[in-house]
Image: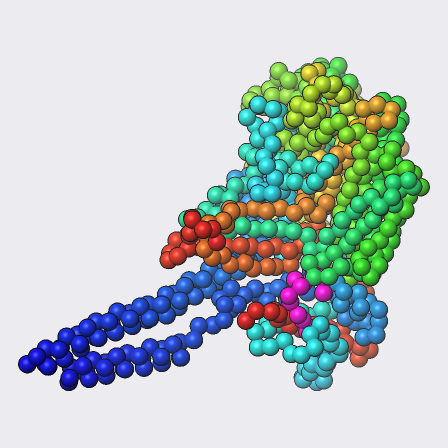
Amino acid sequence: MMRTIEVSIVILILAVAFISATFFAVLPSPRQVSSLSLGQLAFTTLQVLDTGQALAETVFKNSSDPSWTDFEIALSACLPPNIVYNLTVYDLIQTGNTLTYSKFHSITNSEGGLGTDSEASSYLVTSTNVTFTVTPEKISGTLYILNCSDANGWWITGYTSQSLAGDLYDLLSPYFNTTIMVQNTTDFGYLLDGTKISNFPHENVTNAIILNTFGEAVPIPSSYMEYSEDSFAEYCYALGQRVNQYNWTLVSIVGYPLYYVSNTVELVSSQNLWGIYGMKDVGPRGLSAFLQGLANKAYNPSSDSIHGPFFVANLNTWATYYSNYYGIYPSPYQSSTRSLPDWILEEYDLTIDAEYGYVFQQSGEWIAGATYSHVGADEKIHGAFTALGLTRTPDVRVTALALLMYYRPTLYKSEFTLTAGERPTQRLIVLQLSQQGGS
Amino acid sequence: MTGSTIDHLVATTAFIAAILLFIGLFTQTLQAAILYQQNRHVALKASDLLDNILLSPGYPYNWGETNATLSVFGLQKPGVSGYVLSSFALMRLISLSGEPVEYPRDSGEWYNNISLGPSGYLFIPISDSITYETASRLLGVNGTYGFQLSITPIVKVSISESQSNPLTLKVEVDGPGFPLSGATLSYYLYRSYNTGNYASLELLTGTAQTDSAGVAYLNFTFDGASESYTIVAYARLSGLLGLGHYSHNTYTGGAGVMPFVVDYEKGKVYLAHSWDVHDQGVPVPAYALNATFFILTEDFEFQEWPIANSTAILNYGSKNYEITTLPVGCPGFLLVTYRISAVEYGMSIMPWGIGTLAVSTVFGDNPAGNVWAATDLRQVTIDQMAYQAEIICWSSQGYQVWNPGTGW
């Protein structure tokens, strides 16, 4: 009997242990196993509602303003139906060294409290009155970006001309009245003939900027294939003449300018000596012929290479200034292996403005990157040429900086107009969310 | 002696029975606790995984705009902070929502199909797309966790024909919670009209406001049944932006002209004759097409952008496609209008970047067969459009994670 009593005691102990364990080791509710991250949901909801600063505009309006109703509808619409919310807006008031939070307005879709399972996120907004805005002045000349689908680039390793064209569009189009992507060599041919290629009202072929994204190559239209003398150096000469005639600014983004011509249809069986088909090797004669064309000199291209040795090119003082002004920050130190000698200035009647022409400091006789303007007999500028003799791969921010330096569009910056104590400039929004239904 | 034996027998039997009973009871409690812990861990992993995907641009940063091989997976728009996603990175993900399409037929070249509904197409070469296995490996969850990521617009803008002559379109604007009443609606209606060999586009624009049920009616003066048109309408209310589109074609004999992105990095697009995709029998019509690309501006307006080879006549057997190029990294949409006869026209639309036409996409694995999966949600913006990113995550190893017989 004794053993039975002992076992009964053991069973009793086990039962008590089990009941105690069950009583104290309470598992959280199933919802807590996998609840939505309500805090994150609240934060991202506020962030989405602040797209275009819409939230900042609303919360600084009077609490009876109709925009609060719109905001309430938008908030309800973007949360899942089983989520209830409580949104409170606080004024931030600074008195001396003390910052106090004063409740300004509150909206909710829950009659009672949100319960202990709720989570909240806060979001600080600044009045749109104190938001700093920048509006660039528009350059009147048309910006043409060569984006020809029937040409290949060289020395743009790691990129395609099309991706560079897209990046340059993003960087530069805010500064121009009209920016046009030249989609094929045929359209480029029309430009060389002085014909518009779009129905954009402000397109103007004269005084335009031609941005060559093809690196050391330049697209050649089918209609210009007859300019084939000296491995198409004759075409480069014609190009120089057009730059002079239409007062263009031609931009070479990297390497030795005009070293190759490219047209994937007409030159389908030619390659650039490095296995890239659709290209023809013009060699140093391309640049020589171009400069002769630009300077209105007789055609007599030289096959001598005129680029300088390797050196590290440093942004010059003015380039650094404009880099800060436009907020474009390429590395101030760049590798240059295709700089041009300064004797070309005299040889081809070129000039570089000391303030806005040089991108890099001149190293001895070598110019790593600058915009060369051709001054005609009438002492007016007839065409310009931006040559960035840097080593591949190209950084298009240098190109953008060089162009902006040359044209210097003004940035109109908004002013801080609010007077101290007029009204709070910052408000804190707290969005508290909770799930309804279930346990 | 007998009493003692009986005592021992009763005690031993009761002891063994009690031990077995309590082992069972304690095991149940422990099992529930282990499962809870495991599921909690999966839920945390879901949240963690979602933030990893949404708050990193990946590497290379601009992988969404190139054919680059990924070394880090992430969908955040490069150069932007917060939950703002790259609409081009999302285009490179292999979608679960549409069946792959082979183009040309029997060529063995397959395209990822992000479904848009009638007349809306988005085909990206599978060879240029990112697979779930790649993403899973780069996220470090291959073999341990599975996931499915859904990116859907918060605001749903549905357009339907309410009356054909004169045309009245009904636009319904809804969020996941409630209809969007009082939303400002702006629309672009592109209508085909005949100008010689090719159809041209007439643009009609306007604004309206949704009523308390989130509905607005747009009235036009032409007969909708006898005209081909495409309307793109967007609704805006207090920072929330949603978009919908609808096309009506007078030609119903086939899919017409179908755009295929053949070289993603260069933005090269084939405007293909549908005969190369589905042979719908004779007669096979010729399509005189006119393609226009509209770029999305910062002010959320669609501006025409000139593209190469925008007009062509497609004739199966002799010229099955035309090639055009879209600007890489610039979101917008391609609208192709094609003429079959003086009275038969059709239109196809293709988004360039998934945000511009409020396209949804589902990426990942199928959770069917798993016992338990966790979900989490974030609100994100893509090309200024409000989207929800929802993840479903499950464990691929551990205790009671997979039940092939019963599903989940």
Q: Quadrant of residue A188?
A: top right
In the rendered image, residue B345, in percent from the top left (x then y), is placed at 82, 29
Range of residues picked out in magenta: A76-87
What is the number of callouts on the image?
0
Q: Is residue A198 visible?
A: no
Is B349 placed above or below B368 here? Answer: above
Residue shown at 55%/22% (left/top)?
A: A275
Residue shown at 80%/33% (left/top)?
A: B249
Q: Point out the residue furthest to the right here.
A: B221
Q: Point out the residue furthest to the front here.
A: B2
In the image, residue A77 lies in the stretch drawn in magenta: yes
Residue shown at 81%/39% (left/top)?
A: B230
Q: Point out the residue furthest to the left here.
A: B1
In the rendered image, residue B112, in percent from the top left (x then y), is placed at 59, 36
Q: Quadrant of the N terminus of chain B?
A: bottom left
Q: Nearer the viewer, residue B159 or A36?
A: B159
Q: Nearer the viewer, residue A74 or B284?
A: B284
Q: Is residue B246 left or right of residue B100?
A: right
In the image, residue B84 lies in the stretch drawn in magenta: no
Q: Nearer the viewer, residue A110 or A209?
A: A110
Q: Quadrant of residue A70?
A: bottom right
In the rendered image, residue B81, in percent from the top left (x then y), is placed at 63, 57
Residue shown at 45%/55% (left/top)?
A: B371
Is A40 placed above or below B172 here? Answer: below
Q: Nearer the viewer, residue A189 or A398?
A: A189
Q: Is residue B103 visible?
A: yes
In the rendered image, residue A269, in percent from the top left (x then y), is placed at 62, 15
